[in-house]
Amino acid sequence: MSRLLQLHRKQLVSSLNTGNCAAIENEISGLLGLGIGLTPSGDDYLAGLSAVLFITGHPARKYRDIFIVALEKEKHKTTQLSAITLREAIDQRYRETIYGFIYQVVNGDLENIQQSINEIKKIGSSSGCDMLCGMADAFALTKINGGNYVDQDCN
């Protein structure tokens, strides 16, 4: 299962990087329901990814409809709770701890970032860690997708 998660994650990031819409939908399908529990790891990863990629004004927001279509087609592969949680993340509705973390990162307020990360890690058995992985990939994709000022400190 771990190898499948990593494979689909890597291929989804690559597909988002190149803008291959069919591959994006295929990889979302591969991740949905992958794992165990009320919210499988693949779903939690997608929720974390969605929380960042679909912020209003984010350049990757153009892929939002693909995520929605894939979820609607394949929601039978996961739990009802997980499908709802993922749809809410796509629509930018998630836990306050996640909102606070994203706000801190986007605004460069990194002083207490470890505390926010630790709070997210407490979500579920492994859900928080899976969501953090998704958010990390989304932040990395931000520059690739043309996010403003992402590399301002790299010059």
Image: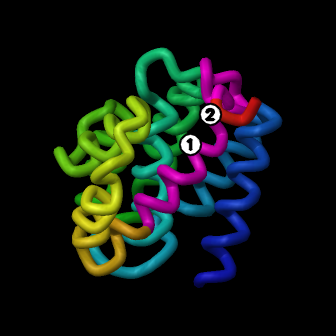
**CA–CA distance between discs 1 and 2?**
5 Å
Q: Residue at x 79, y 36 (%)?
A: 20
The one of 88 and 152 positioned closer to us in this rendering: 152
Queried whether the magenta region covers residue 10, the answer comes back as: no
| Residue 133 x/y as whole percent | 51, 61
Please determine whether, in this image, residue 150 is positioned above or below residue 50.
Answer: above
In magenta, the rendered stretch is: 130-152
* Location of mark 1 (residue): 139
Q: Which mark is residue 27?
A: none
Magenta segment's dominant SS is helix
> As drawn, is 127 to the left or to the right of 77?
left
Asked which secondary structure carries label 2, the reply is helix
Q: Nearer the viewer, residue 117 or 25?
A: 117
Residue 8 point in image, percent of width and height: 68, 63
- Does the magenta segment cover residue 138? yes
Q: Is residue 48 left or right of residue 63?
A: left
Pointers 1 and 2 in contact (C-beta within 8 Å): yes
